[in-house]
Image (cartoon, rainbow, N blue to C red):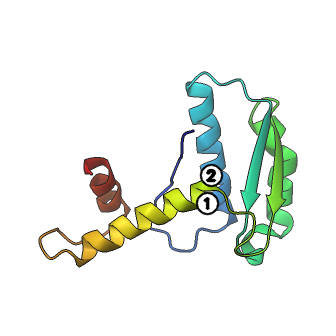
């Protein structure tokens, strides 16, 4: 199992950011040699970000954008539909918070600092 976390300075993480990350993930799978025909995604996020016409258009265009891979995007209520990736994400967030409380470590100013810290540790 392999996890992908996308970190940036934009705190809104709107639907277009999610679409961008999904396409980055697709490119990574292709570059790694996977010939995926179906992409399954779980989302338990904000309804204003994920339950509008924008993600449905993206789902309908996904096979064209990925040269034939279908996307099944399942929506759950907040706190439902969680998987192992949620625990991994929580672990990273906790490590980042603990690093910021450690007075001997430099304070993180942006996404690049966070990525550098995570690669280092």
Label annotation for residue 17: 1
Pinpoint residue 90: horizontal percent, then vertical percent. Answer: 49, 65
What's the residue at 49%, 69% (across, down)?
A: 10
* Residue 93 falls left or right of residue 107: right
Residue 9 lies, with reference to residue 112, above or below; the image says below
Assess whether mark 1 and mark 2 are in contact (beta carbons under 8 angstroms).
yes
24 over 48 or under it: above or below: above
Residue 92, position in %: x, y?
Answer: 42, 61
The residue sitting at 65% across, 25% down in the picture is 34
**Location of the N terminus (image quadrant):** top right
Residue 61 seen in the current view: yes
How far, Cα to Cα, is label 2 from label 1?
Answer: 5 Å
Pick the front one: 72 or 55: 72
The label on residue 79 is none
Residue of label 2: 20
Observer able to see residue 108: no
Q: Residue 50 sits in which quadrant?
A: bottom right
* Rendered residue at 80%/68% (across/down): 76
Q: Residue furthest left?
A: 104
Vertical placement of residue 24 versus 88, above or below:
above
Spot occupied by residue 20 in the image (x, y as percentages of width and height): 62, 52
* SS for callout 1: helix
Say if 58 sits above or below 102 in the image. Answer: above
Q: Residue shown at 16%/68% (left/top)?
A: 105
């Amino acid at each position: 199992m392999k996890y992908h976390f996308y970190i940036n300075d934009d705190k809104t993480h709107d639907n277009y950011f999610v679409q961008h990350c999904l396409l980055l993930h697709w490119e990574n799978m292709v570059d790694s040699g996977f010939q995926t025909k179906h992409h399954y995604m779980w989302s338990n996020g904000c309804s204003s970000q994920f339950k509008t016409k924008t993600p449905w258009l993206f789902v309908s265009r996904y096979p064209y954008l990925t040269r034939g891979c279908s996307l099944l995007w399942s929506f759950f209520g907040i706190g439902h539909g969680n998987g192992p990736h949620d625990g991994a994400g929580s672990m990273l967030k906790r490590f980042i918070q603990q690093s910021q409380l450690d007075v001997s470590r430099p304070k993180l100013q942006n996404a690049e600092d966070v990525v550098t810290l995570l690669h280092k540790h």
